[in-house]
Image (cartoon, coloured by chain):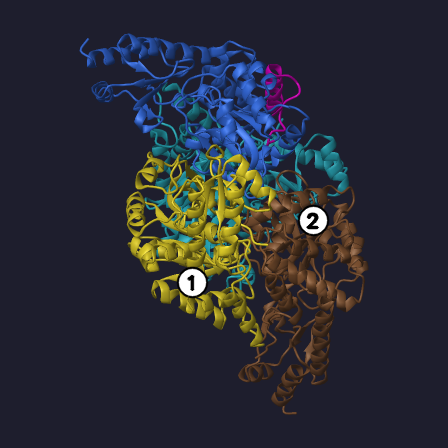
Chain colours: A brown, B yellow, C cyan, D blue
Amino acid sequence: MRTFRSDNNAGLTPEALKAIIAVNAAGTHEIGYGDDASTAKAIQAFKSIFGPEIAVFFVATGTAANTLAIASLTQPWQQVICHAHSHYNDDESTAPERFTHCRISAIHSNDSKLTPADIERSANSRGDVHQPQPGVVSISNTTEFGTVYTAAEIKSICEAAHAMGYRVHMDGARFANAVAALDCDPRAITIEAGIDALSFGGTKNGLAFGEAVVFFPQGDGKAFAQASETFPYHRKGTGHLLSKHRFVSAPFAATIADGSWLKHARHANAMAKELASGLKKLGIEIRFPPQANGVFACLPPKVDAALHAKGHGYYPFGDPGWKLSRLMCSFDTTADDVRGVLADVAASLGR
Amino acid sequence: MRTFRSDNNAGLTPEALKAIIAVNAAGTHEIGYGDDASTAKAIQAFKSIFGPEIAVFFVATGTAANTLAIASLTQPWQQVICHAHSHYNDDESTAPERFTHCRISAIHSNDSKLTPADIERSANSRGDVHQPQPGVVSISNTTEFGTVYTAAEIKSICEAAHAMGYRVHMDGARFANAVAALDCDPRAITIEAGIDALSFGGTKNGLAFGEAVVFFPQGDGKAFAQASETFPYHRKGTGHLLSKHRFVSAPFAATIADGSWLKHARHANAMAKELASGLKKLGIEIRFPPQANGVFACLPPKVDAALHAKGHGYYPFGDPGWKLSRLMCSFDTTADDVRGVLADVAASLGR
Amino acid sequence: MRTFRSDNNAGLTPEALKAIIAVNAAGTHEIGYGDDASTAKAIQAFKSIFGPEIAVFFVATGTAANTLAIASLTQPWQQVICHAHSHYNDDESTAPERFTHCRISAIHSNDSKLTPADIERSANSRGDVHQPQPGVVSISNTTEFGTVYTAAEIKSICEAAHAMGYRVHMDGARFANAVAALDCDPRAITIEAGIDALSFGGTKNGLAFGEAVVFFPQGDGKAFAQASETFPYHRKGTGHLLSKHRFVSAPFAATIADGSWLKHARHANAMAKELASGLKKLGIEIRFPPQANGVFACLPPKVDAALHAKGHGYYPFGDPGWKLSRLMCSFDTTADDVRGVLADVAASLGR
Amino acid sequence: MRTFRSDNNAGLTPEALKAIIAVNAAGTHEIGYGDDASTAKAIQAFKSIFGPEIAVFFVATGTAANTLAIASLTQPWQQVICHAHSHYNDDESTAPERFTHCRISAIHSNDSKLTPADIERSANSRGDVHQPQPGVVSISNTTEFGTVYTAAEIKSICEAAHAMGYRVHMDGARFANAVAALDCDPRAITIEAGIDALSFGGTKNGLAFGEAVVFFPQGDGKAFAQASETFPYHRKGTGHLLSKHRFVSAPFAATIADGSWLKHARHANAMAKELASGLKKLGIEIRFPPQANGVFACLPPKVDAALHAKGHGYYPFGDPGWKLSRLMCSFDTTADDVRGVLADVAASLGR
């Protein structure tokens, strides 16, 4: 049965599974740890999206992608600014501290996105050796609330951050959904907007264990040089260098080459729009604009109880006071799945 | 083309691939992070091997398995004793230090296995706060030199280690090969011999990203309690908790249930025996008894040059002074592969 | 010249200096690292204050005292709740992360003290492996804003914290000033109120490099056992075990035995009261009640400029928007020093 | 009573105590954390010894000096090569791992000094991402066995180390004794010989909590730039930045300015020579040449028992199989102390 719990509850897209089968069928041995032909192809696939000047690396989990990307951009006495409800602050245990030693300065906000003003308030004012030094601003795009930063918003954040000595990391666990939502060139919301590092998610878009870290040269290029030189050591030194690398890289290569990474993201986004619009019609309040594949609804207790009784899966999310339920759509969510939950909501409301 | 570089250069066994396809075909959503049905099945599969009293966890890499197992058994001011050429000391960068903070006390030996006397010499004699405290003895079975500890040898090591306050970890990246070589009950060389923790390798035996950590209760059970309670936090807090857990656990469940984990290991071992015996017949010195799937040969320079010219792959291994070449056999090494390299050795020797 | 910059800008009290001279004059050798007679005496001195059931250790800096105390009470996947302007969050760089790996959850408040409600809001609600687990609540007494928690306030914080699985640490860099302000039994605001660990400051009260960490048994005694057993290893393993221990412990022993620790704190408190009352009379707004040895004043820009021009030293403090100046009194601040600065304020106001 | 346990069992030299009294007597306030006049003077004193191009920092303990110096020169994936009986490997718990994350590669040797050949054997041969990368070679001068590296020996070590990409750190906990023994310009065995960092010990030469870290520019100056820029953050971020800095720096300034640092070291060295020569005359074997202030004697069991019965203090040292006793002389060891122990040895031998 499919649920709305999380986009990581779905399995593999047909294209991803086909890539695994194909790379295995070759029957040849491949050198381990990333020096293989599939990984070379995957790197090229990323360069086809972002341009030739990037550095790209593969890991198995989103936490690894985020923490290692940020570790590669920081020193252990710096600080990382992020939204209090970002995955980095809220769902990665203390991996950020263990891998970076940096202070997390979490911004509590009623909005789903950070603004340059938020960041300026949180950035360290005194700057002496007693306080954490400027490090990284991390934003999520798609945000954890299903909204999407525009290229202009990202640019203004990067300018503010860079001016204060911070680098900017984008948690793109749902980057595909953001690109699909904005229908933009992926470069426009990354390298061209000033982003230094991107965690490019595959797992939540139908891969198995597939996350990529992409570094972009910005400014004088020093942060890029530090990050791309030290990432391999951070990755190996934390047990995140996968030996049979082709099984993580081949699905990336295939799904980027055939465009299915965006096709599936568009579908998930469309399902979420459908779901949100159906809920609204039923009088349910939707807290954030459903720009990507998540819907954040204020379900009346009786609706909530009825849905759980019917076996629907989804999680509470955000500040407890907000009383929000998060319903995530996946690449394999069907129109029937959406209709099904809407029907049960309607029934619970006596319609 | 297949080479003798490493058993991680091979792909997936047919049974492993089938398991991935099957678990995906179900088309259902599964709760992430290990609370799914496939993982429950895999845990049961491990209990069918080792008994019901174990705790078992899954990760993607051998370095993660080793370092997290040992981190769960230690405090940051202890020491870990291992062979200088163990994977833990020689091939995991400084992940041991980053995850445990423990001192590695590496034993330099001309032998492939550690003895209780080796361990006693390396264990800390003074015991005050200024020196690292007793922590873990780590042995590899199969060793990195293709030899296998017997149950009696392991028992004597565990007794010596426990008497000095150390717990014992077994790096079983090639545990299947050891069990196949000894043709023994897996319990005999683990729980019954006194082992506290086992890294049970899947990757080098035909899985994709598949390593399991198994903890065994020993003595008063305190080490087991500490390890099995803290492992989940260590794993999550280092980014090693895989969300789509069924893709790591289902292949384990399947290949243990159908016995193919041992079938493939037996085959790889047999190929190595064949290779070693062929090399010996050609007058090549073999340094360690080829008990499992690795052959460590002193190739004369002209043989070495000829093999590389022919495109054969393998690595130098051990102390540089030993001038050893390591030839690893995999589940998919064929008798023809062995005959091929032997023929090229013979030719290079003018036979 | 004396300033109001910080109570660590003063030198040694006569009693502290005398103790150093005396312990040296003996001319004997003493075993290092805390096994000496002076340290035994100092431990007894602390037991005379807090009772025989405590464990007490000495370090050189306040950051060491706080971070090592908290490291001894936590696991690397927990969280520490504290005031955003606490020394722990605001003035110890990332030593908290490097020594504990815990997440800091900083509470932004317009008040100088935390309440049980603040803590409950910040404590982790979900409790699964993805989020930091309950660890330590740290409060400062005297607070960084010169106010003092009462025994009742501390008790209610400890009850709330313990109920949620947190231990409670008190940063007592200015503990003497708090005791002097409350004129209470030191046990009443520590062991009897539920405190698990106290950083007992000497440096800001006229010692050279002198901080003590005191652990108190609470509840089932498990946290106390863990902390007092692991502290020595944390201290040594971070380079904080002083070899010539008697030079840190003898001044503690002497100044506790002769009561001068409280005498000097009372004097500093009295000077601050005098200063605050003088400023108020001159129409200067004082933000927090001057209960201990610090005064937090909203100095009009022209007053501020005039004071700096005259060579007076003090720092801005707190949220930039508060526009607060912190004037700290020390054991050696004189009534003349206070009159001097008041006169210059008056002059700058044209009175 | 004075013993031969350790040179850190002695108190303060008269000059050091005088400096503390003097800096306190001034009665003024001083800005904390090293921005004071005494620290500026101490820095100048170090420049008078080593030249103007150095960077110098003060900490309280030898472990802090060594680990922070090395942390400032390394990345967390590198290795540190040192003698197995060096203080760094043998007496600093796991502070090296906690502060640097580097692998310690300890050289087991029957000699007290390392040679370039030792270092070359231990340096990492493969150099790929799986093994720790070149980091730091650490040598002790005076060694832990009372011997002294000459300028020529140090130069050859530095050349070998630098050629392999390592920087060189000197643990100079007893640097004064080495300079006194060699009667050389301190520059000859440091900056001119290629040393990158020196832990300059004060504590074992009559200060209270006084260690300095000195960085020297070598080669292209990049290591020096990295180390001198990052040391302040490493120091603060591990709680080792002392607030009342003048009490650590003033004694350094005074004892360097008046030459007493070398006077006291010469005296301790002379006492050790006297002691060693007396023991030899009594037929006691001395294992290493007594070039500085330590004597390493093979005391027959009956002599050992008799000395302990008489209350003499000293420790076993080195490999247990060596059966060595270490007798350390201090700045305040008297000729009578030496005569006393020699008389008791003679008596125990029936002479």
Residue C103 sits above or below residue D307 on the image:
below
Q: Could one spot residue D37 in this view of the protein?
A: yes
Which x, y percent locates residue C123? 53, 60
In the rendered image, which quarter is residue C6 located in?
top right
Identity of the residue drawn at 73% across and 66% down: A258
Circle number at residue A123: 2
Amino acid type at mark 1: Lys
What residue does disc 1 label? B263
Circle number at residue C330: none
Can residue D37 be found in the magenta stretch?
yes
Can residue D338 be found in the magenta stretch?
no
Chain under numbered label 2 = A
Q: Magenta part of the protein: which range? A: D32-57
> B152 left or right of D214?
left
Which x, y percent locates residue A337? 64, 82
Residue A200 sits above or below residue C73 on the image:
below
